[in-house]
Image: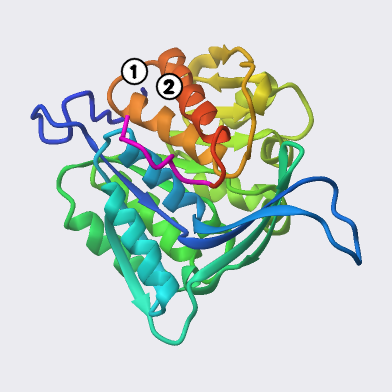
Amino acid sequence: MDGPSPGPSGADGGSSPARIVVVGDIVTDVLAVLAGPVAPGSDTSAEIRVTGGGQAANTAAWLAWRGCPVTLIGAVGADDAGRSRVAELTALGVRCAVRRHPGTPTGTVIVLAGQGERTMLTQRGANLRLTPAEVTATLGGTPDAAHLHLSAYTLLDAGSREAGRRALVAARGRGLTTSVDAASAEPLRRVGPAAFLEWVRDADLLLANADEAAVLAGPGTPAEQAHALATVTRHAVVKAGAAGAVWAAPGGAVISTPARRVRVRDVTGAGDAFAAGLLAAWVAGAGPTEALDRAAELGTEAVGVVGARPPADEPR
């Protein structure tokens, strides 16, 4: 990878895996996996679960499930939901640098999932309370960190934007590599692609799905979009769901991974698992082809379970 690289031996040169710091959202998902199209004004059958969610928290959970040391920086309410979300992540092996905010609810997302898509109704809650000082303090207290991964939801909300921007600057100042997940197409449209790309300029890696890439890079093939985004960040990955993914590297090289036939139960959190698989491999020293393969493996695992978190069996 271009720029500072933690390599496979960790930031301190020892034999332990490199620690990844993830910054961003922690929410409660109220997940409804629909049996068919929504019947407006009437009833639609669904399998409904209340689980942990949030792009950053999901990625951290999948990283921990893969055995990668991971610290999550975020914010929850001083409520039962916040305590449950932190307890779930801690049980998975995530080191939580999470502040509880009295008087502000833990974020909640209602997810309507079905037919390979999901629609989200979002209350950001305490996620908006994340501060630059909290990010800086945690980075300063994490000497084994090698990489920082930022959920762009932190940048897309005005209340947490400075924390997100500080995270990238502070990480680079400490010699960490950085990555950003573009998060969601509609919020990207609202803030404007030019502003967002300026905020993430010079990050080592930008991940975007097909809809997000269309907002940020305009129409084109995934390869063309990834190449355009890689003129802003050093590397760019465009995820095309079941059609595979494309990685654009410095100098114009483009690497693609083929489509995979998989049984899909629920796509919620699949992109977050994909990011975790990619980062765990890349930060350990893998090249783009291997990192994309590991990402696809974890994404496939994710679509085979209901909910955004790893399956409740032994870690892989």
Estimate how packed mark 1 is, as few (under 14), some (14 to 19) or many (20 or more) residues with alpha carbons within 10 Å.
Answer: some
- Vertical placement of 114 versus 90: above or below? above
Q: What stretch of residues is rendered in magenta?
A: 308-316
Q: Quadrant of residue 2?
A: top left
Residue furthest out toward the bottom: 103
User: What's the residue at 54%, 13% (across, down)?
Assistant: 255
Can the viewer see residue 131?
no
Q: Is residue 288 left or right of residue 192?
A: left
User: Is 47 or 287 nearer to us in this picture?
Assistant: 47
Can the viewer see residue 55?
yes
Between the residue at mark 1 and the residue at mark 2, the CA separation in whole angstroms equals 10 Å
Please tell me whether mark 2 sits on a helix, a strand or a loop: helix
User: Is 175 or 31 nearer to us in this picture?
Assistant: 31
User: What's the residue at 42%, 29% (across, down)?
Assistant: 277
Q: Please name the residue that numbered disc 1 is placed on.
A: 286
Q: Please name the residue that numbered disc 2 is placed on.
A: 294
200 inside magenta stretch? no
The answer to whether marks 1 and 2 mark residues whose Cβ atoms lie closer than 8 Å is yes
Can you give x and y, in whole percent of width and height, for residue 21 in the image?
31, 47
- Vertical placement of 232 versus 91: above or below? above
Please tell me whether mark 1 sits on a helix, a strand or a loop: loop
User: What's the residue at 32%, 33% (across, down)?
Assistant: 66
Q: Amino acid at mark 1?
A: Ala
- Vertical placement of 260 versus 65: above or below? above
Q: Amino acid at mark 2?
A: Arg
